[in-house]
Amino acid sequence: MRPLDETGLALTRRHFFGRSATGIGVAALASLLRAETRAESATAHGGLPGLPHFPPKAKRVIYLFQSGGPSQMELFDYKPRLEEFHGQDLPESVRMGQRLTGMSASQSSFPVVPSKFQFARHGNSGAWVSELLPHTAKIADQLTFIKSLHTEAINHDPAVTFIQTGSQIAGRPSIGAWLSYGIGCETEDLPAFVVMISPGKGTGGQPLYDRLWGSGFLPSRYQGVKFRSVGDPVLYLSNPAGFDGADRRRFLDSLGKINQMNYEDLGDPEITTRISQYEMAFRMQTSVPELTDLSKEPARTFELYGEDARTPGTFAGNCLLARRLAERGVRFIQLFHRDWDHHGNLPRDLPKRCEEVDQASAALVQDLKERGMLDETLVIWGGEFGRTVYCQGRLTATDYGRDHHPRCFTMWLAGGGIKPGISLGETDDYCYNITKDPVHVHDLQATILQCLGIDHTRLTYKFQGRHFRLTDIAGNVVKNILV
Amino acid sequence: MPIRSFVTVVLFGAGLAGAKEPTVEFNRDIRPIFSDKCYTCHGPDAANRKTKLRFDIEAGAKIELSKGRKVIVPGDPEQSEVYKRVASNDPALRMPPAYMGREKLTDAEIGLIRRWIEQGAQWERHWSLIPPKRRPMPEVPEKNWPRNPIDSFVLARVEREGLKHSPEADRRTLIRRVTLDVTGLPPTPDEVQAFLNDAAPNAYEKVVDRLLASPRYAERMAFRWMEAARYGDTNGYQTDGVRDMWRWRDWVINAFDRNMPFDQFTVEQLAGDLLPNPTLDQRIATAFHRNHRTNAEGGIVPEEFRVEYVADRAETTSTVWLGLTVGCARCHDHKYDPIKQKEYYQLFAYFNNVPEKGLVYNFGNEEPYIKAPTTEQEHRLADLDKSVADAEQHWRSLAPTVMDAQRKWERKIARSKTPDWTVTEGLTFHSPLAGRRSSVEVAGCGKDDVHCDLPLADSPAGKGRQFDGKHFLESDGDVANFDYLQPFTFAAWIKPESGKGAILSHYEDYFEGQGHGLYLIDGKIRLHVVFRWTDIGLRVETADPVKLNEWQHVLVTYDGKRKASGVHVYVNGTPQELKVLFDELTWPMDFKLPLRIGAGGGLRFKGAIADARVYRIALTPEQVAAIPLQRSIHEIAALRPETRTKAESDKLRFAFLDRAAPKEIRRARDELRTVQKARQQFWESIPTVMVMAEGKSRDTFVLKRGAYDNPGDRVTPGVPSVLPPMRPEWPNNRLGLARWLVDRGNPLTARVTVNRFWQMYFGTGLVKTVQDFGSQGDWPAHLELLDWLACEFMDSGWNVKALQKTIVTSATYRQASAVTPELLQKDPENRLLARGPRLRLGPEMIRDQALAVSGLLVEKVGGPSVKPYQPPGLWQELAGGEGYVRDRGEGLYRRSLYTYWKRTVAPPFMINFDSPNRETCTVRETRTNTPLQALDLMNDITFVEAARKLAERMMTEGGKEPRERVEFAYKLVLARPPKPAEMQVLMETLDGFEARYHRNRKSAKEFVKHGDSPQEIKADARELAAYTSIASLILNLDEAVTKQ
């Protein structure tokens, strides 16, 4: 059985985002397809028949995206020899003519600058973690570091788009949309794919774009739903002032009756779908506020995640919501924390970002573990690329900046399917090139799908005559980090 | 089983009851299997072909294999290797191969291949590459049903499948359907009534003619075209800056309104600039291919994205006109269709000569662009030109008066000492540096006495200071902080002892830093205006060095238009030849820095500087020349006029006009300046639009693996060889390409276009894959009909309105849309067209309908995009900044095609209801049915306000009785009265809401306050709230958001 294509989408079962209205009747087709439909996992809603391809290690993903490109040299990839090279020009033998961004390519010099921040080894695994991430350091044994990620893009828009969709150019579905399409959701009352955004407390950071959680050429119902801290958590969730839940119930009862009459006259199954979508909307009006209401969280929660978690829209608050979404069966939860783009003033600004995310990131892993959910939840932490070892702009005794660096960067993973307490991949003394076990973005994507029981070469969608997939025509599962 | 096979088999093959061993058609039944299952390794892509065996061409499929085996033996599947291999159960033999993870073909597919061979294995060229022909009209038994040939084709097919067509829809349904389809808005109750009352046999045709003549039709058509053209009001990458392309959008509306033939519509948009003596409109039309996304992200490699823009044009052209997925041949030969990678780049080459940049401007249109005044603006401009001409004329007529007055004044000042005059207009900083008094206050000179201890130096402009190459002067205030769009002038007398140093700067004290700096480097005068040294700024230098150890006056002006061409440098009042070192000033600047004299950018000055000035305007050459003059006005006045230099005469005239001109002269001069300024301001307010242009011809190369930095062989422009060749009389450029697309011999353009129109009415094209007519595309449900429509379209002179009329006046279109379980089972997608279309409205129609029935809609064709309601914070949470500032007043109530489209954060309502995101060309219409849509229709302020205003109309125009009022709303929205059972539900619901709001007046008051529009009737809030609830319910009905 191969995944459905453009013409076959209407065949998926009832699903949070309803179904295509192109006209195929559910009832009519369900009977035609019955013979072909394989047993789906008992808890999945939506998704394709035949998926997952094999028993998954993780049921869901929480992806803590650090937007802007956190510096691997200041956080995880310890490079003691840089002190020796301090202020020297990056040797051509290291750079090897590789391209730079237009922001630093025409600098008159490329002085190497070591991290200002101290490193130490942590846990039984002895992982090197920077002093900027003390909480992360404490859970180092839960984490797997990949220090050899590399990407093809050198600027934010194409690089974030690449990680999210497998292509630098707009138009492809995001990873969460692929999962929503492929394996649906564990709950009917919430979307399969939820996105939450927090700005850095500095300038806010680089912009993000709706396409990063978009559905590309997949139908729009697979796109990520933003949970927002301003106004309604989900767009248009609240009834207008002066119109309460009881009014809405009365409204829907009558609406449903009239729609039902119309269905009886016309026989279009689209009408019954619409009736059920309105009922789903009504349920969301209850389930979402219940989800975002933190008043019943014990004090211990806020000790763990930090007091910031009480403030809606902070990274810590979003981490806590991520756990609550995970508990309720949401498939793919993605947080974006902005403002990691430290072209200048890195020593001043990087510590602030770390402070904003460190405790809550670690707390989330810890919390999931304590609740017995870590084994079935894949947690990912990282940005779209790394940063250059040379200083961008003026190097002074106290200040430096770093440009975008696509050739190596670090991420960590934890939880479902991942071997804890290891580090994969090595970079050279300049933290410029990978010397061992390179992991391409497509490899990371293939590995994420693998953890969820999906063969990345077989989750495809036919569009414009081609069977597209998240990993394009590449991607190798990084088996070394899998359990 | 994949669903396409299901459609193939059940609908078009042997699956239907009563059919027995029907003829297998290669194109319909076999090619799709070969394409999808075999082409990857046995198809057009030479790089991937393992052997000579290929199934995309007949010769390749009918080769002889080793040991005398044959791939295909007509009539004998068991001897045909292709059949044996696909039918094999041995994984080692079976094709497609198990080791590649490919599934076995389905039994239905294997059966088709078997029967095809049994029936003789006839091969056909791919259907869409054979030019369309009119085929004989099929005979149908029910001769009085067809209203035009569409119906004969459809009916013949319906009957062949053993089905029956549906009866005609009732008139109310019909007029609502056609009015929404043709104009995007619902019919008014009066229009419905007139149609019901019209007993003429052509009553329906009259309605259609009325609709097609309405400007609303043009707006409706424009919307879909905007999606295909990936129109947006922003650039679409990262910072997603603004652009102005609405003049193109209005061109499209106008073209549909005038019923411009589609061939002309094509030629003007693709190549209007290359037509002989192109009109402004023809040039605006070419904005079609500047609508693609553009990238302004700092640091990108410009060529990488310029290539992306060209690729977008090639691929969009191919999708919109040819229905071919040429994009698949960007990195390698096409895997399914006969398009080579080289041919992709030949198509690419047509669009590769635009004089454009890869890294674009973030705050407005990027070159090439043109001023595109509207007709009204052209009139206004002509009026202003006339006022300027009049004022100039008046000024010239005063010349003798001016001359007389000036002479008198000259005689007076020649006799008595008078203070000298210099240019003070726009002067913002003037530091004579010592001694000599001036009419301008000396701005802070030096923060500490070390600086002020610099020794004095004599200069032609009085005392200056001697700089030692270490110390410098610094202003107290931030006196020269200019944004990049602000003009300025820097000036000073200098006597340099070294060829390197800073003269005047508002710049970090770091050479590769930020700010404005006037330097000497290698003895040449340099201006740096820098946001970021490496990629954002402007740097120019003089061709010749200044003289060392001599006093010279240096002055630089910048006109605020962010280009190096707007920089002029003068030495002693004489313009200097300039060399542009860097010309990318694209970003706002606001640096808090002191103004420094003799320092900046890490440089110091050695020598003397005097009379440093900063103006916040760009001085004119005449003003510039007046500054360094040695003679005071008193001295010049004493000279005989013919012995004065031009600069001296100018200085004297300036001084006279400034200080001594009589009232009449001043008034005339002020008047001239005022009208000139008004004309200039108006000119600047005229919108621009980015257009196509041919710059210097660029070489085009095959890009290996599609990568911008990996060129292979050079190619010249050309069309794919599988299609008819260009004619020799056409130029081999974009214009020729456009003519080729709409040539009668092109097998694709007309088919692809009529298919897209068909999709607008029936939700699905006759070829379902509207964007792909290649071998992976869907087989047309009605090929004969598609071809008839294509021929009809071309033969009518590509008459767009006539084609719409043909479709909507067909009996096929006019059928009722009710569906029986049997028909639903047999033809769930209505591909056979045995019933009328029933489809959820597109997003723009759902909103426009709500505005129309509530009376809020502001109908005004064209103009800049507007910003209706949107939940707050959507822009800020992704990008910070000021965010979305919604309109007040009419901007809230315009039709949705005018809604401002920010590509990275598209309007949420539109996206909720399946609008394409406008990042790339989209021609496929999709419709989903989701809970987020339900929430939107119930709670979005747009619809809550519309419900309130509809309630007001119910209470004022609907009559006195609740039943009348509800009926009124029903007729407005659904074009029909409620049925009794519906009325009963509605009345009970109304009673319920009335009782509820009577219990709680406060809620009622809150509920009737949503939206900016004032309440225009006197009504009790409780009653209005109850009716608002009912109005909202009606707007939420499935029928309300559906055309049925």
Image (spheres, coloured by chain):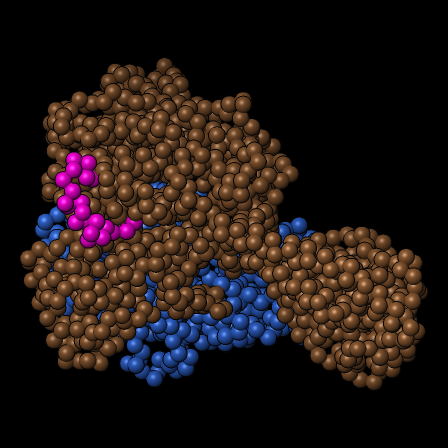
Chain colours: A blue, B brown
- In the picture, measured across the screen, residue B313 lies left or right of residue B588, that is left
In the image, which residues are magenta?
B184-204
Residue at left offset 80%, top offset 66% = B405
Q: Position of residue B625 (x, y in %)?
A: 82, 61
Of residues B95 and A239, the one nearer the viewer is: A239
Q: Position of residue B834 (x, y in %)?
A: 16, 36
Quarter of the rendering containing residue B229:
top left
Residue at left offset 52%, top offset 38% = B272
Vertical arrangement, residue B801 with respect to residue B140, above or below: below
Quarter of the rendering containing residue A464:
top left
Q: Position of residue B650 (x, y in %)?
A: 81, 61
Residue at left offset 72%, top offset 66% = B665
Residue B186 belongs to the span the image colors magenta? yes
Residue B981 belongs to the span the image colors magenta? no
Quarter of the rendering containing residue B387:
bottom right
Q: Position of residue A144 (x, y in %)?
A: 45, 64
Vertical arrangement, residue B886 with respect to residue B816, above or below: below
- In the picture, measured across the screen, residue B832 lies left or right of residue A339, that is left
Q: Quadrant of the N terminus of chain B?
A: top left
Task: Report if residue A446 is visible in the image.
Answer: no
- In the picture, measured across the screen, residue B279 lies left or right of residue A144, that is right
- In the picture, measured across the screen, residue B144 lies left or right of residue B948, that is left
Of residues B137 and A279, the one nearer the viewer is: B137
Of residues B988 and B687, the one nearer the viewer is: B687
Vertical arrangement, residue B122 with respect to residue A422, above or below: above
Task: Report if residue B820 is visible in the image.
Answer: yes
